[in-house]
């Protein structure tokens, strides 16, 4: 009975700490109207009047007492499997990047979509190509005339039930390849250049896709274009003259 009472109190407390305009938990800074009704920073900038008493919000004040309360209340992450304890003011920020959050935001900056079916979304809406990969590994190739400033964008590698989203581009003198896993794991992938004269193995860790909005938290696979042009890039004979190709065999070796 005490447990049920505690849960009811927790629910009541959390509901009183939600912005009445957007129903999201408050995070500092919190503002209030002249009558003392609280409103979050975003809504205070987008709403003309208080959602509770309709007073104009031109004259708003910081609710320091509520902000201090947010810094002292400890809660648990909402997502199943996480269990992390944190102060209430950090809850929303943590859950946006929590690896147990099933609602993944779209990887395209201009798109506001978020949901559980990211692969379906980016293939149907953004036409991202998906490549079927053998469980033992498959060869992927990057073709370009202007290797030093090329952007191949996103593609999907599907190894049976394992899915890796990748983004590849050249920025000046370096080729970058970012690898993201759809789960909470960090996969070890082996990237092997297929040029028989200069065959090299690279071992790379994938990042959980939830980390994408952190703007690449880990150092991606990268290689100097000067070195690649000298030892690895090959002519793409079936394409028009001038195209070069970087061919790499990709294998998933296991979890971290």
Image (cartoon, rainbow, N blue to C red):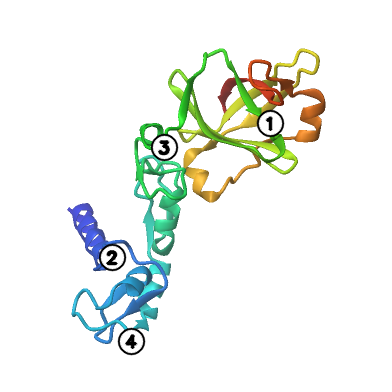
Nearer the observer, 159 or 237: 237
- Residue denoted by label 2: 18
Front of the two marks 4 and 2: 4
Give the percent coordinates (x, y) of residue 252: 57, 21
- Residue denoted by label 3: 126
Q: Earlier in the sequence, mark 4 or mark 3?
A: 4
Front of the two marks 2 and 1: 1
Q: 76 left or right of 141?
A: left
- Above or below 88: residue 120: above
**Mark 3: few, some, or many residues within 10 Å (few <14, many ≥20)?**
some
Residue 41 quadrant:
bottom left
- Residue denoted by label 1: 145
**Mark 4: few, some, or many residues within 10 Å (few <14, many ≥20)?**
few
| Distance between the alpha carbons at the discs numbered 4 and 3 | 43 Å
- Above or below 51: residue 224: above
Give the percent coordinates (x, y) of residue 107: 46, 43
| Distance between the alpha carbons at the discs numbered 4 and 2 | 21 Å
Q: Earlier in the sequence, mark 1 or mark 4?
A: 4
Q: Earlier in the sequence, mark 4 or mark 2?
A: 2
- Residue denoted by label 4: 59
Front of the two marks 4 and 3: 3
Q: SS for tag 2?
A: loop
Q: Earlier in the sequence, mark 2 or mark 1?
A: 2
| Distance between the alpha carbons at the discs numbered 1 and 3 | 24 Å
**Mark 2: few, some, or many residues within 10 Å (few <14, many ≥20)?**
some
Front of the two marks 1 and 3: 1
Front of the two marks 2 and 3: 3
Q: SS for tag 3?
A: loop
| Distance between the alpha carbons at the discs numbered 2 and 3 | 34 Å
Residue under the point 28% across and 65% down: 18
Q: Earlier in the sequence, mark 2 or mark 3?
A: 2
Q: Residue furthest front?
A: 241
């Amino acid at each position: 009975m005490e447990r049920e009472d505690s849960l009811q109190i927790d629910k009541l407390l959390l509901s009183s700490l939600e912005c009445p305009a957007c129903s999201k938990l408050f995070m500092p800074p919190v503002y209030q109207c002249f009558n003392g009704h609280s409103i979050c920073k975003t809504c205070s900038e987008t709403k003309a009047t208080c959602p509770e008493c309709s007073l104009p919000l031109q004259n708003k004040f910081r609710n320091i007492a509520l902000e201090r309360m947010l810094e002292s209340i400890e809660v648990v992450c909402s997502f199943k499997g996480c269990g992390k304890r944190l102060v209430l003011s950090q809850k929303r920020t943590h859950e946006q990047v929590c690896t147990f959050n099933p609602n993944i935001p779209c990887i395209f900056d201009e798109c506001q979509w978020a949901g559980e079916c990211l692969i379906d979304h980016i293939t149907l809406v953004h036409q991202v190509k998906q490549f079927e990969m053998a469980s033992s590994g498959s060869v992927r190739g990057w073709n370009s005339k202007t290797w030093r400033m090329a952007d191949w964008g996103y593609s999907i590698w599907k190894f049976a039930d394992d899915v890796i989203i990748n983004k590849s581009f050249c920025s000046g003198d370096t080729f970058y390849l970012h690898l993201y896993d759809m789960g909470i794991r960090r996969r070890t992938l082996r990237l092997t250049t297929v040029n028989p004269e200069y065959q090299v193995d690279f071992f790379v860790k994938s990042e959980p896709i939830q980390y994408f909005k952190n703007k690449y938290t880990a150092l991606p696979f990268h290689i100097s274009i000067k070195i690649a042009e000298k030892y690895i890039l090959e002519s793409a004979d079936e394409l028009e003259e001038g195209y070069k190709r970087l061919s790499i065999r990709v294998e998933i070796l296991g979890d971290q």
